[in-house]
C-alpha cells in the first residue's frame, strides 16, 4: 500500500500547492456561498454558475489547512461540468468516503461502500477518515457546495 499512499499524498500536495479553480465569478448570476470550519479556521467562498442543470463554471477563494484546501480543489475539479444531479451524487459519494472506514482498493469479504476506482483523484482523501478531526476540514468545501446547490432556484 505504500506506493498508493505516496500517490495519494502527491495528489493532495499538488492540489494544495496549485489549487484549481481559484478566483471569483460575478454574483449574480453566480451563486455565492460561504463556508467556515471553526474547529480549524478553514474558510471557503464558493461561486457556482449553473445553466440548464449543469455546473458550467465554479470558482473559489478562501484559506485554511492543507486538507481543507486540497479537498476544495479536488471538489471543484470533480464537480465542474457535472450536472447538478450528478454533483449531488458526487457529494453523497464523498460523504460516504468520509464515513467509510473499510474503503480500500483490495478488500476481502464485505464490499466497500465506495469503489475507490470510480472516483478518480478524490480517492486521495480517503486516508483522512483515519483522522476524525480532519474530516470536517475535508468536508467543508463539499458542505458549502451542497448549500449552494440547495439555493438553486
Ligand atoms: Zn482544516
Image (cartoon, rainbow, N blue to C red):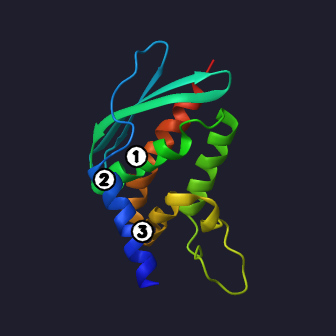
Residues under numbered marks 3 and 2 in contact, where contact means CB atoms less than 8 Å apart = no
Which residue is farthest bottom? 108
Mark 3, secondary structure of its residue: helix
Numbered mark located on residue 73 in the image: 1
Residues under numbered marks 3 and 1 in contact, where contact means CB atoms less than 8 Å apart = no
Asked if residue 127 is positioned above or below residue 88 in the image, the reply reads: below
Mark 2, secondary structure of its residue: helix
Residues under numbered marks 2 and 1 in contact, where contact means CB atoms less than 8 Å apart = yes
Mark 3 residue CB less than 8 A from any atom of ligand 1: no
Circle count: 3
| Corner quadrant of residue 35 | top left
Q: CA distance from mark 2 to mark 1?
A: 7 Å
Q: CA distance from mark 3 to mark 1?
A: 14 Å
* Mark nearer the N terminus (2 vs 1): 2
Asked if residue 138 is positioned above or below residue 110 in the image, the reply reads: above
* Mark nearer the N terminus (3 vs 1): 3
Q: CA distance from mark 3 to mark 2?
A: 12 Å
Q: Position of residue 122 (x, y in %)?
A: 51, 58
Pick the front one: 132 or 89: 89
Q: Position of residue 14 (x, y in %)?
A: 33, 57
Q: Which of the image's four quarters has the C terminus?
A: top right
Task: Give neighbour class at mark 2: few <14, some 14-19, many 20+ (Cα, 10 Å).
Answer: many
Mark 1 residue CB less than 8 A from any atom of ligand 1: no
Numbered mark located on residue 118 in the image: none
* Mark nearer the N terminus (3 vs 2): 3
**Is 144 left or right of 40, judged from the image as shown?**
right
According to the picture, the residue beneath numbered tag 3 turns out to be 8
**Is 20 left or right of 109, judged from the image as shown?**
left
According to the picture, the residue beneath numbered tag 2 turns out to be 16
Which residue is pictured at 42% across the width and 54% down the height? 138
Amino acid at each position: 500500500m505504500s506506493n498508493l499512499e505516496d500517490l495519494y499524498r502527491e495528489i493532495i500536495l499538488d492540489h494544495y500547492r496549485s489549487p484549481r479553480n481559484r478566483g471569483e465569478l460575478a454574483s449574480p448570476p453566480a451563486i455565492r456561498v460561504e463556508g467556515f470550519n471553526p474547529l480549524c479556521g478553514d474558510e471557503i467562498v464558493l461561486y457556482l454558475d449553473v445553466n440548464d442543470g449543469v455546473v458550467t463554471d465554479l470558482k473559489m477563494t478562501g484559506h485554511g489547512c492543507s486538507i481543507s484546501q486540497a479537498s476544495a480543489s479536488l471538489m471543484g475539479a470533480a464537480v465542474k461540468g457535472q450536472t447538478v444531479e450528478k454533483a449531488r451524487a458526487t457529494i453523497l459519494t464523498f460523504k460516504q468516503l468520509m464515513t467509510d472506514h473499510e474503503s480500500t482498493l483490495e478488500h476481502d469479504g464485505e464490499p466497500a461502500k465506495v469503489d475507490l476506482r470510480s472516483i478518480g483523484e478524490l480517492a486521495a482523501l480517503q486516508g483522512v477518515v483515519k483522522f476524525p478531526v480532519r474530516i470536517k476540514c475535508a468536508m467543508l468545501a463539499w458542505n458549502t457546495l451542497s448549500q449552494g446547490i440547495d439555493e438553486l432556484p
